[in-house]
Image (tube, helix red, strand yellow):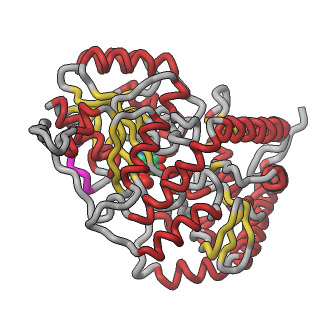
Amino acid sequence: MAIVSEQTVQVIQKEALSSQQRHLAALMESYTKRTKTSKANAQAHRQVLADPRLSEWFDPSTKEMCYLIVGARSQGSRIWDVDDNEYVDMIMGFGANLLGHNPAFVKEALQAQLEKGIQLGPQAEFAGEVAELISELTGMERVAFSNTGTEAVMTAIRLARSATQRSKIAVFTNSYHGHADGVLVEARFKLPQILEKLIGKAAIARFNARSFPMASGIPTAIAKDVLVLEYGNPGSLQVIQANRRQLAAVLVEPIQSQQPDLQPKAFLQHLRQLTQDSGIALIFDEMITGFRLHLGGAQAWFGVNADIATYGKVVGGGMPIGVIAGKATYLDKIDGGMWSYGDASCPQVEKTFFAGTHCKHPLSIAAARAILQYLKHQGPTLQDRLNQRTSSFVERLNADLETHSLPVRMANFGSFFSPVFCKDADPTTIFSLMAGLDLLRYHLCDRGILLRGEGGGFLSTAHTDEDINCMIQAMNGSIAELQKAGFFPNS
Ligand SMILES: Cc1ncc(COP(=O)(O)O)c(C=O)c1O
């Protein structure tokens, strides 16, 4: 065995370091030059504009590239920034743009509504029609509208608590349900972030299912009414069974954007049976899965009928909207239930509180009507085809990731995809990859591909084969560069 002197080791380490530093400097130079107006915009307004997304991926070593690309216009699968750079957009409005940007028929519906004015107060002309469409496509009995997904989930929980007269709810680790206080709860003990990433939040929850507020400013008292359980683990069903008399609802993100490879059909079917037997409302948060995975969302996908489902994103075609849909037992809590004119009928059910100045906003409702009519007309083949295209795209990406010997793969559900670490990957390798993965996003952006911060995204019906090829080429080129610079191990 050759003996390497300490000096030689130091020289090799220094060279590796300088190769990384050189690479980083070149990337920063290219990135910030190309997107200089976006960077200037971030700095010019930082003092006044408080925006969490502007510091979300802050890292001292890459801080010069830490800003949002400012969008100037968009069409189909593409976005142009304020420096007129063109991107294949795979953020797609965080899932709102199933049909790509600015579909002609949605634009026409919005223009027609703008011509007619924005009347808040009188009933929105098409609110009833949109409710009927949602009911028809999802099989849900009744429908109410809010402005965002966060509000829809918050309302769904209130309806469940009101109808069951119970206060506790159960949620699952790694799920996201928006930013209302009542769902910003996590299972702890608290570990450093890096260990959390390595071990996984689910494993932490297994050790200790006590729940705590996820961030400062959320009252501890709120967490007392929330059980945070491990998703897909049959042990969680036992905890639900043990708490069945206190639980108003179990809130589920049926396929979690944070672990898209976990698709626990049998677990969900058992959960359905258990909640039904115990009078607990099963709430499916279909914010991402709704109308994307399948016309009937995750419920149709898994063959599970929830009591309440919340939707948003795709429904609004880019306009803000939230939808609370479900069985009359729960939705009647909004308006007192069915009654008719010309007889003695009246609202029978005691209401809870629900309101919102902009609920059923005429522009959002006009866009939703155009989108839902289109989806209904297209039928389930639209989602089937898009899901199939995404799976093929992900397969191609994964073959390349394997060739590059990186212990990370893309997982997809329907047309959503996101990176996951290989189950058998050595934690130290994952740790050493982290910095490179952060840089990968900047590299891809520099090559004209926009992805979500986590490195995944959405395929829309507007993405062409050329877009997909561009993304795959950009990914391969970026990985090769990061390997050459020593940020990723060489295959
Ligand atoms: C599953 C899920 N629920 C709720 C929300 C919150 O929706 P909104 O951002 O419209 O408030 C999101 C948003 O990404 C989501 O993914």
Q: In the rendered structure, does residue 136 fall within the stretch colored magenta? A: no
Residue drawn at point x = 35 percent, y = 43 percent: 143
Snapshot quadrant of residue 244: top left
Front-lying residue, 126 or 64 = 126
Q: Residue 405 placed where, x, y %?
A: 80, 37
Q: Taking the image as drawn, is residue 221 in sight? A: no
User: Residue drawn at (40%, 81%), measured in percent from left and top?
Assistant: 48
Side of 402 where 66 appears, left or right: left
State the image coordinates of residue 148 (x, y, percent, origin top left).
39, 55
Tell me: residue 28, above or below residue 220: below
Q: Would residue 206 be found to the left or right of residue 353 on screen? A: right
Residue 380 vertical position relative to residue 37 in the rendered view, above or below: above
Query: Horizontal and vertical percent for residue 62?
Result: 62, 66
Q: Quick one: 463 or 175, which is closer to the camera?
A: 463
Q: Quadrant of the C terminus?
A: top right
| Residue 130 horizontal side relative to residue 332, left or right | right
Residue furthest to the left in view is 344
Q: Farthest right residue?
A: 2
Residue 470 in view in this figure: yes
Which region of the structure is painted magenta? 217-222
> Residue 28 in the image: x percent, y percent?
71, 71
